[in-house]
Image (spheres, helix red, strand yellow):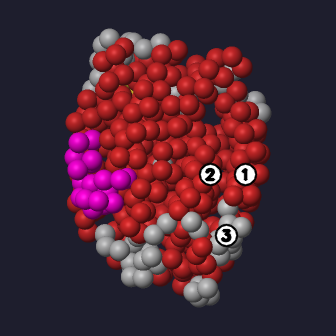
């Protein structure tokens, strides 16, 4: 098995594709909860606020565990870390399918979120370690195509499984799929311990002080937190809003993710490629500006023919998800390799905490009116645009750490 120093371009792409598929299962596990929202609200008799908590619990747990993990992840081979947390992710996803009530499902989602958050951070740290800075935008676009794959294949197939076998079906599928993927990763991934050569021993307080005393780190954390708030205040309620306000049937929801996923499957690679050529901050600003009208259009949508609704949701997904690609390339370049694992874990914790807070706060603004429709989604859209403008201001102010590969 080659080391990271001797990886050929071919093996680098095989490794990236393996990470992409693993990331696909993690993202699908999170994404499939959102189109299942109408089912959960009906079957468990929960309010929009309780559903928002069901979504945000996953991210809050990921934030908490990710923060703790940040103190230790740089002490181990990243391959071993990834395999360990991925095994826990597979088991905890199966536990979600076994949950007999809303309360037990809430607990199972917290466990799955804890493993999933560390896994996502480790994946991004591996990309930062393996791929040089000049190709990192393309690499991030490849691994983050997992969002598109989840939308194209994951969510529609998950909804079909839910129709055939009940809401438990998608979680059983993901739990079982994790085993062959774990075996594949164990074979494909090389030893990933180059970061240990320059690692200096720090106690937890020193580590926190170092991570949060660097201005470039603080700007990177602020960017990702604002970006998550700008996206995940809107995204979890797309499906409930489209059913309650736009007149879509639950069976039509899969087409939202299918069309959006097909589009982003191509756009994510293109945005990553352009980011490497025109500059990552410049590409981020351009995509974020275009996302503003897409957010406002979606959060003010009214009943319309299905093709027009799918066009609106697809444009939203392309540009809102597209912002994350240059943003991740920016923040992974803001830290030196020997600190990247801890930094990405702190960053993941920041992202997850912001995502959970966003969906929870949106749930406080959104309520059912007398006609059974969801009111307050327009206010969520205005808030999301405000956070997007903050991101546009922050992104060009994050520089690269010295000694980037």
> Residues in magenta?
272-291
- Residue beneath disc 3: 2
Frontmost residue, 332 versus 18 = 18
Residue 280 in magenta stretch: yes
- Residue beneath disc 1: 184
- Residue beneath disc 2: 18
Residue at 32% from the left image edge and 57% from the top image edge: 275
Calculate the distance from the C-alpha at mark 2 to the C-alpha at mark 1: 8 Å
Residue 195 position, x and y percent, is 59, 78
Q: Is residue 338 above or below residue 154?
A: below
Calculate the distance from the C-alpha at mark 1 to the C-alpha at mark 3: 16 Å
**Front of the two marks 3 and 2:** 3
Say whether residue 105 is left or right of residue 146. Answer: right
Say which element carries label 3.
loop
Calculate the distance from the C-alpha at mark 3 to the C-alpha at mark 2: 15 Å
Res. 227 in view: no
Frontmost residue, 18 versus 51 = 18
Residue 383 position, x and y percent, is 29, 43
Q: Residue 265, located in which quarter of the rendered image? A: top left
Frontmost residue, 69 versus 366 = 69
**Front of the two marks 1 and 3:** 3
Say whether residue 45 is left or right of residue 302. Answer: right
The N terminus: image quadrant: bottom right
């Amino acid at each position: 098995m080659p080391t990271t120093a001797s990886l050929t371009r071919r093996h680098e792409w095989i490794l990236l594709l393996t990470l992409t598929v693993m990331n696909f299962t993690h993202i699908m596990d999170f994404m499939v909860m959102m189109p299942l929202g109408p089912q959960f609200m009906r079957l468990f008799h929960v309010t929009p606020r309780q559903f928002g908590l069901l979504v945000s619990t996953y991210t809050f747990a990921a934030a908490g565990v990710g923060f703790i993990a940040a103190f230790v992840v740089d002490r181990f081979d990243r391959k071993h870390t990834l395999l360990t947390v991925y095994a826990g992710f597979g088991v905890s996803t199966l536990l979600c399918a076994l949950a007999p009530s809303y309360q037990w499902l809430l607990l199972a989602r917290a466990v799955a979120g804890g493993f999933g958050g560390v896994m996502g951070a480790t994946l991004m740290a591996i990309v930062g370690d393996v791929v040089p800075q000049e190709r990192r935008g393309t690499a991030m676009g490849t691994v983050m195509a997992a969002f598109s794959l989840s939308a194209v294949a994951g969510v529609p197939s998950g909804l079909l499984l839910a129709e055939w076998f009940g809401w438990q079906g998608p979680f059983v599928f993901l739990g079982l799929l994790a085993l062959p993927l774990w075996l594949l990763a164990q074979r494909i991934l090389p030893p990933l311990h180059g970061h240990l050569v320059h690692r200096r021993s720090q106690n937890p307080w020193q580590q926190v002080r170092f991570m949060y005393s660097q201005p470039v780190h603080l700007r990177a954390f602020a960017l990702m937190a604002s970006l998550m708030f700008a996206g995940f205040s809107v995204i979890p309620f797309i499906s409930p809003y489209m059913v309650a306000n736009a007149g879509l049937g639950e069976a039509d929801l899969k087409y939202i993710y299918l069309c959006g996923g097909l589009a982003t499957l191509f756009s994510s690679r293109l945005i990553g490629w352009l980011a490497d050529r025109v500059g990552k901050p410049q590409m981020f600003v351009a995509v974020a500006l275009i996302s503003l009208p897409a957010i406002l259009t979606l959060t003010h949508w009214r009943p319309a023919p299905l093709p027009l609704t799918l066009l609106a949701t697809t444009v939203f997904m392309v540009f809102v998800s597209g912002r994350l690609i240059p943003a991740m390339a920016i923040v992974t370049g803001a830290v030196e390799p020997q600190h990247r694992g801890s930094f990405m874990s702190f960053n993941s914790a920041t992202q997850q905490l912001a995502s959970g807070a966003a969906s929870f706060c949106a749930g406080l603004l959104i309520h059912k009116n007398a006609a059974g429709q969801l009111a307050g989604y327009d206010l969520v859209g205005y808030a999301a645009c405000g956070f997007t403008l903050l991101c546009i201001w922050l992104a060009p102010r994050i520089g690269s750490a010295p000694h980037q590969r």
